[in-house]
Image (cartoon, rainbow, N blue to C red):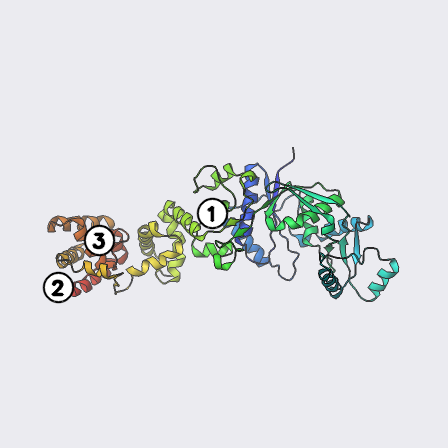
Amino acid sequence: MEEIRLRFAPSPTGPLHIGGARSALFNFLLARKLGGKLILRIEDTDLERSSRESENNILDSLQWLGINWDEGPDVGGAYGPYRQMERLDLYRQYTQQLLDKGMAYYCYCTEEELEQQRQEALAQGGNPMYNGKCRDLTPEEKQKCEAEGRKPVVRFRVPENKEIVINDLVRGQVVFKSEEIGDFVIVKSDGIPTYNYAVVIDDTLMKISHVVRAEEHLSNTPRQILLYEALGFKVPQFAHISLILGKDRSKMSKRHGATSVVQYKEEGYLPEAVVNFLALLGWSPEGEKEILSLEEIIQQFSLDRVAKNPAVFDLEKLLWINGMYIRESSVERLVELAVPYLIKEGYLSENPSPEEREWAKLVMSAFQERLSKIKDVTEQIKTLVGEEVHFENEEAAAVLEQETCPLVLRTFKDKLAALDEVTPETVKTMLKSIMKELKLKGQFVYMPIRVALSGQQHGPDLFLIIGILGKDLALRRIERALKKVSC
């Protein structure tokens, strides 16, 4: 039985974008579902734009998402090297085979000549593809071109009148005609293979059984199949997953939200939330449950539930999913995630003390139910720092005009001042004693205190608010409120 082997092969020309992450995830899911392997290959033949920094960003982003691989540049494997620029000798061997068999040829056309051919074809209403000018050059003509200093590319000789059939695991049967393709470049003038050429050799030598990739690569597939056949290679199974569109149905861009995985990490999204969201971009699980662990997604994943239609990137849904995962997380984990944001905004010192971390724990306990992103805690906490209290609206300010308000605030002030230790337990006990002593219902005790301390009518539990403010600041805020009310 053939071993199941899938690959994710990014170009290290920038950070890992959300579309690439979705492709990596689908390959990972299928590999794990079928008990196969995932190979990470770096396609670094774009010498001007490729960098090791971008490669490291891609690897780090995948690892943050929990997408791991079985072979790759960092872990090795039996079919390396796993960077294309380290495989040039392999490509040269196969290029010579194609040249020797007459299936490829040297093309000496300049960029200016190619552009002229293109313009002439467009003017005649034709397809602007290569016209085959160098297909059958004589040795003398080649010699003349080389004497002029022209550096040739290598073009593949596309068979005439051939139907290329792709049995796509997502899109079904797709048919292309060879006359619509034209002889295409497989090796550039600097000796570097083109994408369509290198990918065929790499996928074959790495024994890739399934190629799962974005729909935009579908137009490349007929060229690749022609190369598989010319080289005597077995054609893998192809599956082209849909494009990702913005909510306005246009191509995904920065205006629809962040585009790279690292941006989502920096904004305070949880990796499991991003994975859950990405899985739902073009794939639908059984039933209506949408919050799924990675294990559940792997168990349910199959290509027959991958949609042909474009997936819509809905940032509001991602925020909702992320909020759900935040609420399911332990406070201890949330504190570790929030500390860098709290340090950056000056709420914690560079090396938080145990006492500061306890304060951060109170903060995350208070706002856990209200956060869509971890980063948002720095906005939520703003009402509970500093001396001034700003009322959220006139309705909140009116709470302090209640007849019993001065008495409640004075009683609260006296009892808080008398506390030796401010903890959730001692504050809860104190608040209950105020209700009992003043013979008032909860809303007439809790609401004035809440508004006096935070300026808001709704929010975290009052005992958490008091804990976050601390005894001294809470007392000063109450004193300010008492000066505003009539005694």
Q: Which three-letter amino acid code belongs to the residue tagged 3? A: Glu
Q: Which residue is mark 2?
A: 486
Kindly state the secondary structure of the residue where label 1 is placed: helix
Precedes in sequence: disc 1 or disc 3: 1
Mark 1: few, some, or many residues within 10 Å (few <14, many ≥20)?
A: many
Q: Where is mark 1, residue-wise?
A: 277
**Mark drawn on residue 421:** 3
**Residue at x 25%, y 65% (from the top left corner):** 388
Q: Nearer the viewer, mark 1 or mark 3?
A: 1
Q: Residue at x 44, y 56 (%)?
A: 267
Residue 416, percent across and down?
Answer: 18, 56
Of residues 459 and 54, the one drawn nearer to the viewer in this rendering? 459
- Return the disc, 2 or 3, that comes first in the chain's sequence: 3
How far apart marks 2 and 3 lie (CA) works out to 30 Å
Q: Amino acid at mark 1?
A: Phe
470 w.r.t. 328: above or below: below
Q: Earlier in the sequence, mark 2 or mark 1?
A: 1
